[in-house]
Amino acid sequence: MVLELMGYAMKPSDRLDATFAALADPTRRAILRRLTTGDVSVTGLCKPFAMSQPAISKHLKVLERAGLISRRRDAQRRPCRLKPKPLAEATDWLERYRQFWEGGFERLDALLEELKAREPKRERAKR
Amino acid sequence: MMKNGEEMKLTTPSDREVVVTRVFDAPRKLVWRAMSEPDLLKRWIPGPPGWPIVRCDQDWRVGGAFHFAWRGPDGSEMTLSGIFSEVVPPERVVRTESFVIGVPPRSGEQLATLVLTEQGGKTTLTLTVQYPSKEARDAAIVGGMNKGLAEGYDRLDEVFKASAHI
């Protein structure tokens, strides 16, 4: 619970930093992909990744701190669960950055159509 | 989820650069006009959604200045200004740019190179923005709020492809 809270006690900007830092590692991305198919225990993750439990636990700690996964503290198997919110925030942000350009380019498309429609007349007038 | 606009590409070829590529179905002469004439630029100028453009001045000549300002929903202002150092119609423009969001400190000066190439009546726009440092680039990409986003960018796709159904 404490670790889970940590992920959300951070400022949104810091949390995004933590999200991207967590995503920087290929093993952690693979773990997240694995979790998209359902909850998995630590031991369940060791096998497919051919890693020791402490190594996997280390990665899970990073993901947990970034708020990307949660783990049940009480249960013995401590299954890991994907938490979609930080991922959604990250995409939202990317979407916004993309929109900075994309909206403008779409308006430019429309403007160019208008200019093209006007242009032939001018060309004809020149001839 | 990530698909938004079929032709725009956003890449980070080096630690200090961001490259935007987009194809337009028009000859580059028209794209050039739409960018260089302030009255036309005003009609499409990019910006964050919900941030209308409130100032759009530019003088597309070597040594000429430009100054754009957007106003956010909370009344804060974001400006982009600089000087043109190279203007080769209708194919190439180089300018320095400074972004200011709210009050200084500003993120520092960046160099923007715009290249238009034409093929079969279509124009490819390639905008390369070179930042003074990796930190400046990351700060600019995330609107001065976060670090390390650019790497996240390249890596996210991979994850989102798998988790699109969440």
Image (cartoon, rainbow, N blue to C red):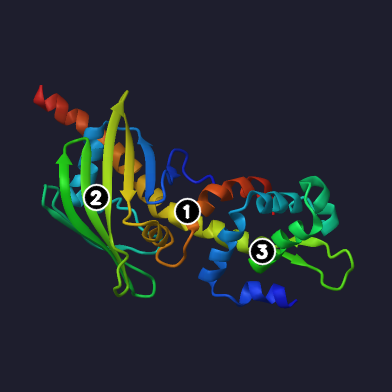
Choose between A9 and A76: the one closer to the eye: A76
For label 1, count other residues whose C-alpha is less than 10 Å away and answer few (under 14), some (14-19) or many (20+). Answer: many
- Residue displayed at 58% across by 54% down: A24
Task: Say which chain tag 1 marks.
Answer: B
Q: Which mark is residue A62?
A: 3
* Count of numbered circles on the image: 3
Mark 2: which secondary structure? helix
Residue at the (58%, 65%) spot, across then down? A18
Corner quadrant of residue A35? bottom right
Q: Chain of mark 3?
A: A
Residue labelled with disc 2: B41
Work out whether residue A39 can be spotted: no
Point out the image quarter for the N terminus of chain A: bottom right
Q: Amino acid at mark 1?
A: Ala
Q: In the displayed structure, does residue B40 sit left or right of residue B166?
A: left
Q: Type of residue at label 2?
A: Leu
Q: Helix, strand, or loop for circle 3?
A: helix
Residue B113 appears at what percent x and percent y?
A: 27, 44
Mark 1 → mark 3, Cα distance in angstroms: 19 Å
Same chain, labels 2 and 1: yes
The relative height of residue A112 versus residue A20 in the rendered view (above or below) is: above
Q: Quadrant of the C terminus of chain A?
A: top left
Q: Give the vertical position of B46 relative to B74 (above or below).
A: above
- Return the disc, 2 or 1, that comes first in the chain's sequence: 2
Question: Toward the viewer: A121 or B151?
Answer: B151
Q: Are marks 3 and 2 on the same chain?
A: no
Tell me if residue A11 can be seen: yes
Mark 1 sits on what residue?
A: B150
Q: Position of residue A82 (x, y in %)?
A: 73, 59
Question: Is the residue under label 3 in contact with that under label 1 (CB below 8 Å)?
Answer: no
Amino acid tagged 3: Val
- Splitting the image into 4 quarters, where does residue B23 fall? top left
